[in-house]
Amino acid sequence: MEAAVNTVRHEHGEGHTHSESFIRRYIFSTDHKMIAKQFMITAIIFLFIGGAFALFIRWQLAYPGEPIPVIGTMLPSTWVNADGAVTAEWYTQLLTMHGTIMIFAVIIPLLVGTFGNFAIPLMIGADDMAFPVLNMVSFWLFPLASIIMMAGFFVEGGMAAAGWTGYAPLSVIASLGQTLWIVALFLIGFSSILGAVNYITTVLNMRAPGMKMFDLPMTVWSVFITAIIIIIGTPVLAAALSMLFMDNFLQTSFFMPENLTVTGRDMSRTAGGGQPLLWQHLFWFYSHPAVYIMILPGMGVVSDVLATFSRKPLYGYMAMVFAIIAIAFLGILVWGHHMFQSGMNPLLGTTFMVSTMVIAVPSAIKTFNWLGTMWRGQMEFTTPMLNAVAFVSMFVIGGLSGIFMASTPVDVFIHDTYFIVGHIHYVLFGGSLFAVFAGLYYWFPKMSGRMYNERLGKWHFWMTFITFNGTFFPMHILGVGGMMRRIYDPTVYDFLKPFQPMNEFITINAMILGFVQFILVFNFAYSWFYGKKAKRNPWRANSLEWQAPSPPPHGNFDKEVRVYRGPYEFSSPESVQDYLPQNVSPEELAAQWTRHEQRRAQQKSEP
Amino acid sequence: MLDWLPENVSTFGEGVDHLFHVIYYISVAIFILVNVIYVAFIIRYRRKRKGDKAYHYHGYNLLEVSWTALPLALFLFLALYSDRVWQDIRYSEKTPNPDLVVEVMGQQYLWHFRYPGSDGVFGRKHIRFISTTNPFGIDPDDPAGRDDLLTVNSMHIPVNKTVLVRLSSMDVIHSFFLPNMRVKQDAVPGQWIDVWFNSVKTGEYEIACAELCGSGHYLMRAVLDVHSQNEFDQWIDEQHENVRASIAAAGAAPDNATLAAQPDDRQSPTE
């Protein structure tokens, strides 16, 4: 093992001196930092596509049947009617693609693809990933899959329209767009597995000398555990998608019961004898853990950001690590809580309710430890810190609203209502996306070598925070009122008519929320080229990535890295300053003290 | 916030709503507690002077244990409490004896309802017989099925009676949602699922589909009429009369003569 590590080091020792062609460097790059940037840029493009879809959905819900302003009449006739209003068919495609894109093309690529790739080798003091070529393949599968999925735009029948959950038989009797959706998800799953194999191997084998597993920063721990969940869960999704593909394309009947009768459709070639609930079990066996795939890395990033800007050691490091492991383990045992009303045996409802209630405990532990981290700190409210602070508070709301659904009888009422929509957005936007923002601002200086604009960063944060709550909090109220999710026009129902003003309020907030994100893009795009040059360690942080130059060259570190301590030695009485990087040797520390004493003595003698 | 809940008119709905309230107040209390501490920390522990060191402290195990044990106890309590209500509404051995059984079949994008005919029994059915003209798959060879009462998007039940809904779907998954009854149950093709409720108040309520079933999902609305027993008897007698009349009309055609004779033979007053 030691030998393998040395070879890699040797190969890349002078790596940054040899020049590479444009294509090798920017397109088919094997450098983990470039791959991270590729993931980031692709995912941010999809963030805007998915966000635009959400705004079309919101427009229709607030003003059912009214033409989309400005661009309505310019859209193709398969999407909008003659007036320029969203059609019911397109609406169903939009909600499907919004969910699919945001989960598989935005949140997972940002948290796992971007931060995993960028942070892991740098934070463990490695030159690159264990398998750089595999890493490149993992990235390129993702745009390929996205193109296949988006091709649904141009085929007959449009994009997939069975919801991001793709429940059979609706997803089986669907059009070509659904088939493309299946193929795309299969490839994205492949990309995840390749990435996960790489992360696990890299973390286990390529840590800098002296670095124990319990010297890893929480970001690395969380992505490492996430990778294990991906390895366990994604093959199941692949199996389920294969079956769905065969049902959808080859008329098999894994999920199709006998004599399914669909108006206007010849089903005589389908033999039947399958079970629709099988899809749900297999899908959720992956997709519930996927919820943790989308939140654990966020928790890791936030832990690092909170500790750095509170200038304090992370409170209860071991408890935090074991809480992540507990979440990962329990996360595999709770998938049935999506299926309380599905027709599953009610006894199983009881089982899954208990496991679901238990999984709230490690989340609570994490929250308390974050509070503990801030206690008696010296907090500095930079943009990453603001986003991390918001994450904790929003995650508490998302966690608490989850308890309602965990309770089977309450779930009877709120299942498939806007309460769920509110909940998932508090976890995935209020949680994951705020963590993404925290991480992007935090590592921007390292990625680009320049500082982002702090004032724009703060504007972006506050506008996002306010309109986020304005958008998603009222959804809980809609859910309590009984408004079903995924309906095209709530005014069809008398009991939902009183909620129309609230729907309008949400839509206005959502639009501002959407447009505010351009501040982030402008800030990053401008600062990338014209920002102030970043120092090596602008945040005075301890983990190893800050000991490399900004931006790190090919091969990352310009000096040998050896680790002497954990990543959270902030404000240690042992250190001269309020931070103590992991790689500062005891001799160097002693030398720092000597210099410090000399300086003080000088200052005393001078006046 | 819970004032927004639609009016509850079912017997077990009170238990559900009570649990909803309990969890709501616990959540609000936890949220306030956590956020008050949080905001206090944010104000109290912000950096005031450059160069000050924070408190170097790695954690305290007893605290970790206690904030593991306390939430665990709370959540297990909630699980046990929820399970009592859950058992009452869903476990088959706790289902009260039904006064009325109604079969419900979901189809893109409407709800079919089926009541026993004037003979008081449902005709035999089999999934093989399901077609767009025979949504429940009633066996054409079973005479008991001929007078079964079928309605579309309109369900009628008597007040204060246990109604057992036997639910299925002929195409994709739908979800039978009665907001005022606190009932929601997916209708799964190829499978019959029982769900019961008992309305304590007469009136007209809405039935919705809660599971995405296609682009017409939002149109899948039906109306539930809860009548007094008298009104309900009157309604069902009327409907039975209509069915008999239509069977007789069909019987007037020569080739259907044998079919039409049977229901009349077996007619006996049912309660």
Image (spheres, helix red, strand yellow):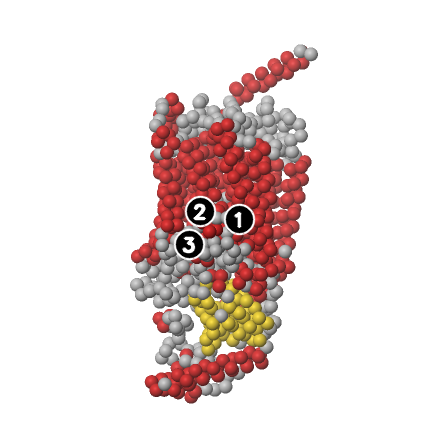
Name the mark nearer the viewer: 1 or 2: 2
Q: CA distance from mark 2 to mark 3?
A: 23 Å
Which residue: 59% across, 40% down?
A462
> Measured from the top left, where is residue A359 in percent x and y?
52, 49
Of the image marks 1 and 3, the number of the one nearer the N terminus: 3
Q: CA distance from mark 1 to mark 3?
A: 31 Å
Residue holding disc 1: A425
Number of the label disc, if any, that sits on residue A533: none
Q: Secondary structure at mark 2?
A: helix
Where the N terminus of chain B falls, by quadrant?
Answer: bottom right
Q: Secondary structure at mark 1?
A: helix
Q: Mark 2 belongs to which amino acid?
A: Ile
User: Is residue B53 left or right of A206 when viewed as pictured?
Assistant: right
Of the image marks 1 and 2, the number of the one nearer the N terminus: 2
Q: Mark 3 belongs to which amino acid?
A: Ser
> Measured from the top left, where is residue A603 in percent x and y?
65, 14
Which residue: 51% across, 75% down?
B100
Residue holding disc 2: A101
Q: Mark 1 belongs to which amino acid?
A: His
Pick the front one: B47 or A326: B47
User: Is residue A100 left or right of B30 when viewed as pictured?
Assistant: left
Residue holding disc 3: A77
Residue furthest to the right? A607
Total numbered badges shown on the rendered structure: 3
